[in-house]
């Protein structure tokens, strides 16, 4: 059995599906045509499909020839509200864009489905193929968990293509992989007055500027430098005229970290910090906190080793690469709260074809020659995990 070679033979199939999905991207919770197209393809492959009435996304179920454990393979399917500027012949024209590679993930999982079907006779157990909607909302996984997608599942596996990793290397590594994410809004309340008489009012903009400056000091001087933390203010809105003190200023930002203890105290720390920064200006600070995805951490050493061995089996030790933990987030983390999980990365970067842009960029592109490796890794992990569990129980 050589899944690497077989997957290479599926290159045109995987690429065709990737380009089809790329050309017609759909935003989170709007993936209606994407879901329908995937359902029709799974039906054509004679893979039973589970749909979710009134909701996008679906699950395909491949039952092996022998009883055993159940493993879930997950791919996300939603796009971003970005107007594409790649110049590719299959570029999207509808104002949305697969600028994070979810089209690649779905196409790779379809390729994995075909590989697994070819080896169904040696498959002990069940493989669930989850094409998940709404990952970009940071809450998409929660819906599918609530609908029972993990019921009876013994392990879950996910792959993310990554432009910052050279194609076609595979990163399967233990420990923190993607950060937890919390967004927030800070509303600074002051008092309007004429700009020529600032002492008669409370300057919301000056207080907001002080809050931003204080935030830099918090990260640099109040925080353990050995615990990764990023807090970014992404927008500031306030004021109506050049000669009037702003009475309300709204700032929005995001906080990213891996440590759950730090995450638990961060909201309280920032509330106190912002209030103190605004106090000398006679202003008050109101913080609205929005908890999003927890951190993606590969906790399970058995799954990590299963994934690494699968990659070595397919492409040798030279097929493995290193990718440092990322401060971006992924809602795959929710699955880890319920079952053992493994999350890895597939290199998609290649300067020779201008695949150099970061994710969520209008010029984002990937090296499609890496996609068969993703399909092979999905399938090899599922086979190796299920066979290993069956042998352990024998």
Image (spheres, helix red, strand yellow):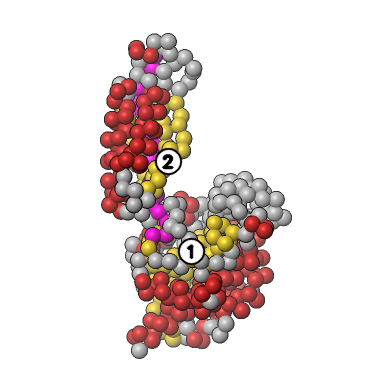
The residue that label 1 is drawn on is 322
Q: Residue at x 27, y 41 (%)?
A: 268
> In front: 88, or 68?
88
Q: Quadrant of residue 38?
A: bottom right
Say which element carries label 2.
strand
Q: Where's the C terminus, which quadrant?
A: bottom left
> In front: 347, or 246?
347
Residue that protrudes farthest toward the top in the picture: 196
Range covered by the magenta-colored residues? 176-193
The picture places residue 112, in percent across and down from the top left corner, at: 55, 73
Q: Is residue 366 left or right of residue 337?
A: right
The picture places residue 73, in percent across and down from the top left corner, at: 47, 69
The residue that label 2 is drawn on is 232
Residue 167's tag is none
Q: Residue at x 35, y 41 (%)?
A: 220
- Chief secondary structure of the magenta portion: strand
> In front: 206, or 92?
206
Distance between the alpha carbons at the discs numbered 1 and 2: 26 Å
* Number of other residues with Cα within 10 Å of mark 1, as a class: few under 14, some 14 to 19, many 20 or more: some
Q: Is residue 285 above or below residue 43?
A: above
Say which element carries label 1.
loop
Q: Residue at x 56, y 57 (%)?
A: 163
Q: Where's the N terminus, which quadrant?
A: bottom right
**Marks 1, 2: nearer the viewer:** 1
Q: Quadrant of residue 385?
A: bottom left
């Amino acid at each position: 059995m050589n899944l690497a070679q077989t997957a290479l033979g599926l290159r045109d199939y995987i690429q065709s599906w990737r380009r089809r999905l790329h050309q017609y991207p759909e935003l989170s919770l709007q993936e209606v045509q994407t879901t329908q197209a995937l359902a029709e393809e799974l039906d054509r492959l004679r893979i039973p499909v589970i749909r979710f009435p009134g909701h996008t996304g679906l699950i395909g179920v491949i039952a092996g020839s022998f009883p055993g454990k159940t493993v879930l393979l997950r791919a996300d399917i939603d796009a971003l509200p970005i107007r594409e500027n790649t110049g590719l012949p299959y570029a999207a024209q509808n104002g949305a864009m697969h600028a994070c590679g979810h089209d690649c993930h779905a196409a790779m999982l379809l390729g994995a489905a075909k590989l697994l079907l070819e080896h169904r006779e040696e498959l002990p157990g069940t493989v669930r193929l989850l094409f998940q909607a709404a990952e970009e909302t940071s809450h998409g996984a929660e819906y599918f968990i609530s609908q029972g997608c993990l019921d009876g599942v013994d392990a879950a596996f996910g792959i993310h293509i990554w432009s910052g990793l050279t194609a076609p290397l595979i990163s399967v590594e233990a420990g923190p992989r993607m950060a937890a994410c919390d967004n927030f809004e800070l509303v600074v309340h002051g008092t309007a007055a004429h700009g020529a008489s600032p002492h008669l009012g409370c300057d919301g903009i000056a207080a907001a500027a002080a809050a931003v400056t204080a935030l830099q000091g918090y990260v640099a001087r109040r925080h353990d430098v050995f615990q990764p933390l990023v807090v970014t203010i992404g927008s500031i809105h306030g004021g109506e005229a050049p000669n009037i003190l702003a009475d309300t200023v709204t700032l929005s930002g995001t906080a990213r970290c891996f440590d759950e203890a730090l995450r638990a105290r961060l909201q309280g720390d920032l509330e106190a910090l912002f209030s103190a920064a605004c106090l000398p200006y006679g202003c008050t600070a109101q913080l609205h906190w929005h908890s999003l995805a927890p951190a993606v951490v590969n906790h399970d050493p058995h799954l990590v080793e299963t994934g690494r061995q699968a990659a070595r089996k397919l492409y040798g030790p030279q097929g493995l690469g290193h990718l440092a933990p990322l401060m971006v987030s992924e809602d795959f983390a929710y699955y880890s709260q319920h079952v053992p999980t493994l999350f890895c990365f597939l290199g998609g970067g290649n300067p020779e074809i201008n695949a150099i842009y970061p994710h969520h960029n209008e010029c984002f592109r990937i090296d499609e020659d890496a996609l068969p490796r993703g399909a092979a890794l999905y399938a090899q992990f599922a086979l190796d995990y299920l066979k290993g569990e069956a042998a352990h129980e024998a």
